[in-house]
Image (tube, rainbow, N blue to C red):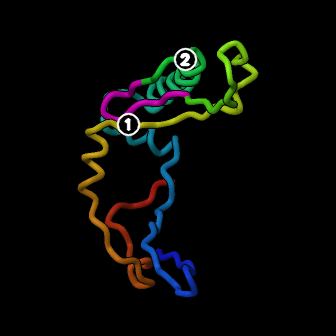
Amino acid sequence: MMACAQQGGQIKYYAGIAREREVSLREMVREISSRSTVTTADAMAVIENFLELVPKFLRNGRTVNLGQLGSFRVNISSKGYDTPDEVGNYSIKRNKISFLPSAEMRENMGTVRYTKYTELSSTLLSNEPDEE
């Protein structure tokens, strides 16, 4: 995939990512189940609990560290004031959930190989069958 933009009257081309279809939660659960001794239902139950707990911990001001994956945390942006006494919870303009990949994840992504996307390569079939 390629993007183009005009800069100073000259067209420039930039590399982009041709994304494959996303991995659904159901597909992830089936993969987890097939690689372990847990059933699909058990894997889904664990993930559903996980999905409830992450926001709970974030709301309580905690960073959620997921080991080799990375960490989630909440950041805020605030209006600036002249004195500390003027600052309050009303000062917060918005909050944002940030994800910071672990060093291992960043290193792992450093090994990704890129190829130029062409119409021909977009029609090639994968060796792995699609599920769903």
Q: Nearer the viewer, residue 16 or 43?
A: 16
Name which residue type carries label 1. Ile
Q: Position of residue 28 (x, y in %)?
A: 44, 42
Query: Of callouts 2 and 1, which one flags the residue occurring earlier in the amino acid sequence?
Result: 1
Q: Residues within 10 Å of mark 2 (few under 14, many from 20)?
A: few
* Mark 2 secondary-structure assignment: loop
**Magenta region: which residues?**
65-74
Of circles 2 and 1, which is in front?
2
Residue at the location (52% across, 24% down)? 54
- Furthest-right residue in this view: 90
Q: Are marks 2 and 1 in contact (CB under 8 Å)?
A: no
Residue 61 - label: 2
Left or right of 98 in this view: 39: left
Left or right of 2 in this view: 111: left
Q: Can residue 40 be found in the magenta stretch?
A: no
Residue at the location (39% across, 25% down)? 65
Which image quadrant for residue 71?
top left
Secondary structure mostly seen in magenta is strand
Q: Is residue 5 above or below residue 20?
A: below
- Furthest-front residue in this view: 82
How far apart are labels 2 and 1 at the CA level?
Answer: 30 Å
- Residue at label 1? 32
Q: Position of residue 42 (x, y in %)?
A: 45, 25
* Mark 1 secondary-structure assignment: helix
Q: Can residue 67 be found in the magenta stretch?
A: yes
Q: Position of residue 13 (x, y in %)?
A: 47, 80
Q: Position of residue 24 (x, y in %)?
A: 52, 47
Residue at the location (47% across, 63% down)? 19
Residue at the location (45% across, 69% down)? 16
Which image quadrant for residue 53?
top right
